[in-house]
Image (spheres, helix red, strand yellow):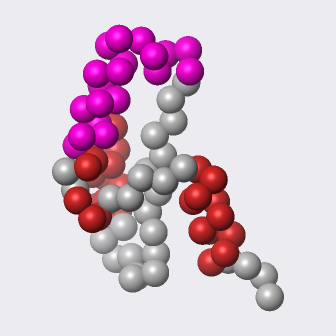
Amino acid sequence: METMWKDKFEWIRTEVEDMGESDIMVFPLVLHPDTSGMAHVIGMIERIVTYLKDWGDEVDFCTFEDVAKEWKAKNAVS
């Protein structure tokens, strides 16, 4: 499954190459609580997180709340 996540991440990156300096890309990693604690899933999550960390400063880890607040602040109606 982590290969699917890697492929999705890399596809999104290729689609946003023309982004401006102030643009952001969100790669949501949503995990259902019924499956995320299973032994084989924990290993996949660890591998995808390690893979994403290897991108260094290009990747920030944020909560959905943080992303929503940032979007709201950038898109506030005056």
Residue in view at x 29 percent, y 64 percent? 58
Q: Is residue 45 found inside the magenta-colored segment of the image?
A: yes
Q: Is residue 2 above or below residue 38?
A: below
Classify residue 68 by image quadrant. bottom right
Q: Viewed as shown, does residue 65 lie left or right of 23?
A: right
Q: Residue furthest left?
A: 54
Residue in view at x 34 percent, y 44 percent? 8
Residue in view at x 65 percent, y 64 percent? 69
Tell me how many marks there are.
Answer: 0
> Considering the image in quadrants, where does the N terminus appear?
top left
Q: Viewed as shown, does residue 44 lie left or right of 31?
A: left
Q: Viewed as shown, does residue 26 lie left or right of 6?
A: right
Residue in view at x 58 percent, y 58 percent? 66
Q: Is residue 26 above or below residue 35?
A: below
Q: Nearer the viewer, residue 14 or 1?
A: 1
Q: Is residue 10 found inside the magenta-colored segment of the image?
A: no
Q: Viewed as shown, does residue 71 lie left or right of 17?
A: right
Classify residue 74 by image quadrant. bottom right
Q: Nearer the viewer, residue 72 or 62?
A: 62
Q: Which residues are magenta?
A: 33-51
The prevailing secondary structure element of the residues shown in magenta is helix
> Considering the image in quadrants, where does the C terminus appear?
bottom right
- Residue 62: where, in percent of width, then height? 48, 53
Q: Is residue 69 above or below residue 20?
A: above
Q: Residue furthest right?
A: 78
